[in-house]
Image (tube, helix red, strand yellow):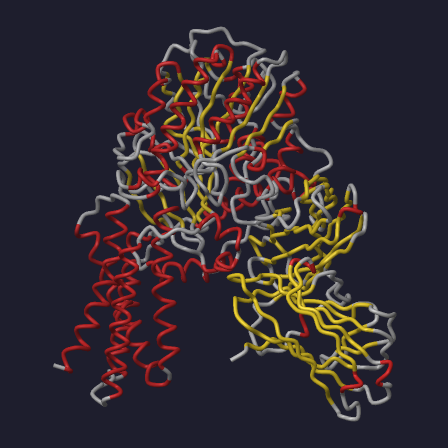
Amino acid sequence: MQKKVLPISIILYLISFCSGRFVLIDTKELKLEKVELIIPVLLDLSFAVLVLFISFFIFKKTKIIASVFLLVINIFHISNMEYIYALNGVININDIHYLQDTEFIKGSLSLNFLMYTLILFLASILFFVTLHYLSKNQHCRYPSNKYLLITLVSFWGLQFVSTTSSWEKSNFILLSIMNSFNKQISLSADASIDYKKIYDDFYSYNKVVDGQQIPLGKEYSSKENVLLVVLEGIPGAYLEEVQKKNGFDYDTKINSFEKIYNHSVVIPNLITHNNQTIRGLYTILSGKYPKLDASTPKATEYSQSENKDDMLPSILRKQGYNTVFLQAAPLEFMSKEQFAMDAGFNTILGEDNFKYQYIEFGWGIDDKAFFEQSFEYLNELNNREKPWFTTMLTVGTHHPYAFPPELEKEFPGPKEAAVKYLDDSLSSFLDSLEKSGITEDTLILFTSDESHGVNGQPLGSNWGFLLAYDPNIDGPIINKGVYGQIDILPSILDYLGLSSELNGRSIFRNYEQERPIMFSTHYDGKIYYIKNKGIVYQVNSHGDLTQINYKNNLFEGDYQIEEIKNYKLRDKIMSYATALNNELSRNYSMDKIALQKSKKIPLENSKKLLISSGQYLTLPEDSMVNISFDYKIDDYSMVNSLVFDLTLNGEERLSTIKRSKEFEHVEHEFYNNKKVEKFSFDLFITPYLKGNENTNIKITNLEISFNNNSNEKLVSDFKKVANLSLNSNILPYFSFASSAYPTSNGNVQIKKIQNNSFLMFGPYMTIGSGKYYAEVTLSNFKSLSADDFSLILDVVSNLGENTIGEKEYSFREYDLKKEKIKLTIPFEIQHPSTNDLEIRLRGNSISGMIIEDVRILEVN
């Protein structure tokens, strides 16, 4: 019986691991032929066997590491399932640091495969319990090395046969590793490229007015309001009218658009040119291509330019329009507030400006609350004399999705439930617009910032949608041409009669000639190029060229894929992408990037507030990186202190305290040895105020700069904050007064100080409820007189507002001839936890004393 238990536990784990693919396929409602599953299932099986083999061999050496190894594999496997469900692609390991980013986790955390996760972990536990029991009783026979070799050969052989970058046909974890560590093709500036010719080819192929106007049944108006509603991640496949025209059946639908189809222009083939909201927003408002890789977004680069081309808000503002930007998410994320200002919006409102929400959601205001409150603002705006242009940006359909719990029971997964919640909210919003009369003199466009992917469509991660509604349009009008987000700006200006000299294309016109168009998915490094109808060329991150053939519509269900060998064409496509990527940055230096020029923040006592996050920047190799900003407090007499927290790329956490100064410059510098893409930092402020009244702080000149002189001395106002543990020396994480300074051996030397002055304070650590004592080790006080020698040790939280323990030490009680003295103070944490525990040491005239060690120990 004992011999049978281990094989049973192995089989249960293998079945559990491999069934993840079927759970995912079922949740995504994919329809795959059985023959299509043979290779990927065999890959999953051989990978799982390989994992168990490795676990066996590690188990012989150390049981704990073997358990951790299998735990990591399971988490990586399930995380890939979550990622595929949300974005139709696997995780890039280079982005794994975002799992440590509290802001990112707050917005993204979900567990859509809870039951499967429990089953997989139970199977893992059974495997290890069985293995432990048999090895303990010497009944366990470990597999020989030849079986490991056979498994390895089988696995890599199957992967060679597969040769795909699609999760449907490969093992999730292996594909993640391959996508992460295969060298990405560089799109850095290249002097050999003819930039002017490429820009002419992609932007000056025709004037907007060269196209034949589509009869809309209405005279164009030069003074008409424009409402642009950008829906988070919604692909064109969700529109039933688009499904019909493209011959593509999809269960998830947005039915509210049926109310306005008969008075709309619909674009079934709209391309989103890259992933990520800030990139899509830039293209929509500028009519220019975004970066086609994951490097610093053009929206950020645009804010650095002195001679900016006018974007859509700026153009309409010059025509006398009120320009308004309404966003459900925090404006600080991706520096969208600064970009919106530079783009020409005169009113910018984000999450903090909305009064209520129905669903607590990490990414911002849920769709129902956002549409309701946005309508109130639009209704007020519509009563003003000026025409207006408003852009609205939702967030509820961002993973992990915002929806009421009762909807989850009606749908196979949270994405579908969130789309239904959006659909219902959108329906009510359309009714409100109609009843208020806003629609009578307003062009309303609905589009998407990016596509979260479409099952069974190789271009689904770039399949957006565009629907233009005006009650006076005689429709529905289906424009079957291939358009992109770059065409939204010229389309709006064409509708308003402002496009006579504008290059580009309008959705309100038909064009006979073909034009080149490019797009990409930077998550997996694929770049796409279209020159002629029926063919899409794809270059993947390894430099392989693939041809995707379609018959009638770009995003249709009928297509063929073939790999081709044409290095000249591949290199030409990459030169196009390189030129479009460097359209802004090649004209000026990016050694300094202004992220926030000026922002006033209302301060509330003890409330942690976000200043900036999610910048997604590219750091050059071998560079000194400096993050800096200035601040000024309206009434600094009301402030005890300010705590600034800085987290670098979700990994290193830093903190600094600033005490009652009206204004100050703050900076942190670090050395970066290799090129880093998608670098972000989180900057927070927590104010500790006096009394009950509040004040404001103005943050200015928030910048990040790069200097290639790595020999310079690092400058920083911040101290590193670690996940400190009990019974470890926490002295390195303290801040010190001018009377104390760190020595080369890690100690702290005390100089002569004034009476009752602080020597040191910190480290603002998290500690759970319980009884503890703090221990400070001192030395080098033999020359001191006991009469002169006294210290006070405090244990506090909330920057001194809450005193947990305090003790005064008179050294008449100590033998100063001893080499070392330990000061101890007991204290108790009664709340569930404290996340800013601080120890303060102060004293009178002491010179030469050394602080060697500070620890917090738990009372047994």
In the figure, residue 239 lies in which quadrant? top left
Q: Is residue 601 above or below residue 616?
A: above
Say whether residue 97 is left or right of residue 173.
right
The residue at the point 86 percent across, 88 percent down is 783
Q: Position of residue 165 (x, y in %)?
A: 36, 53
In the figure, residue 595 lies in which quadrant? top right
Q: Is residue 163 above or below residue 334?
A: below
Which quarter of the image is occupied by the N terminus?
bottom left
Asked whether residue 272 is in view, the answer is no
> Looking at the image, which is closer to me, 373 or 690?
690
Q: Position of residue 459 (x, y in %)?
A: 37, 40
The residue at the point 30 percent across, 27 percent down is 240
The residue at the point 69 percent across, 55 percent down is 643
Asked whether residue 620 is in view, the answer is yes
Say whether residue 515 is left or right of residue 252.
right
In the figure, residue 746 lies in which quadrant? bottom right
